[in-house]
Image: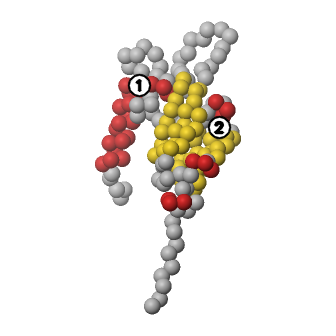
Amino acid sequence: MANWDMFRELDSLRREIDEAFRGVGLGRVLTPQFLTGGTRRFPLVNIGEDESAVYVEALVPGIDPKEMEISVLRNTLTLAGERKGVQTEKAHVWHRNERGAGRFSRTIELPAEIDSGKVSAQCRDGVLTVVLPKAEGAKPKKITVGVS
């Protein structure tokens, strides 16, 4: 028997309601710049860590890595940029436009303080990987116990 989780159910319901009302009353399809208030997060990220660093992978397909803005302050990482819209020679009538375009900015709280002078980032196949070395004060210290 599966465990019932009220918070998981509420989150699922919130996502369904957001999807049902997306774009209602605006007369146009919403883009990520309108969705930064919490209904949709862009870019999607994975966050992990080990003893020495925090690792963030962000999905940024179709975005020029040279135009990405990455900033770190203490234990927060901000990713910002712009996804360009589709340029066509002729005017098309779009029946569905789910990819979205426009400016985005996402600030992520990290699990530890970061040494901002050593942060590195690399983008490959639409996946941005940011390596954030932990500040010395955030790294675990091994303490030896003396015997009297």
Please name whichever residue, 120 or 126, is drawn nearer the observer in this view of the structure.
120
Label 1 sits on a secondary structure element that is loop
Q: Which residue lies under the disc numbered 2?
A: 126
Q: Quadrant of the C terminus?
A: bottom left
Quarter where residue 40 is shown: top left
1 relative to 129, above or below: below
* Mark 1 closeness class: few <14, some 14–19, many ≥20 residues within 10 Å: some
Residue 43, horizontal then vertical, whole percent: 53, 36
In the displayed orientation, state which residue is furthest to the bottom: 148
All told, the count of numbered labels is 2
Residue 39, horizontal then vertical, whole percent: 41, 32
Q: Which residue lies under the disc numbered 1?
A: 22
The amino acid at mark 1 is Arg
Label 2 sits on a secondary structure element that is loop
Asked if residue 54 can be seen in this view, the reply is no
105 relative to 144, above or below: above
Q: In which quarter of the image is the N terminus?
A: bottom left
Q: What residue is at 38 percent from the left and 19 percent from the top?
A: 24
Residue 89, horizontal then vertical, whole percent: 68, 10
The mark found on residue 34 in the picture is: none
Mark toward the start of the polypeptide (2 vs 1): 1
Q: What residue is at 54 percent from the left and 47 percent from the top?
A: 46
Q: Is residue 55 left or right of residue 108?
A: right
30 relative to 134, above or below: above
Please name whichever residue, 102 or 132, is drawn nearer the observer in this view of the structure.
132
The amino acid at mark 2 is Gly
Q: What residue is at 62 percent from the left and 41 percent from the top?
A: 128
Q: Distance between the residues labelled 2 and 1?
A: 26 Å
Asked if residue 27 can be seen in this view, the reply is yes
Q: What residue is at 61 percent from the left and 48 percent from the top?
A: 117
Residue 58, horizontal then vertical, whole percent: 57, 41
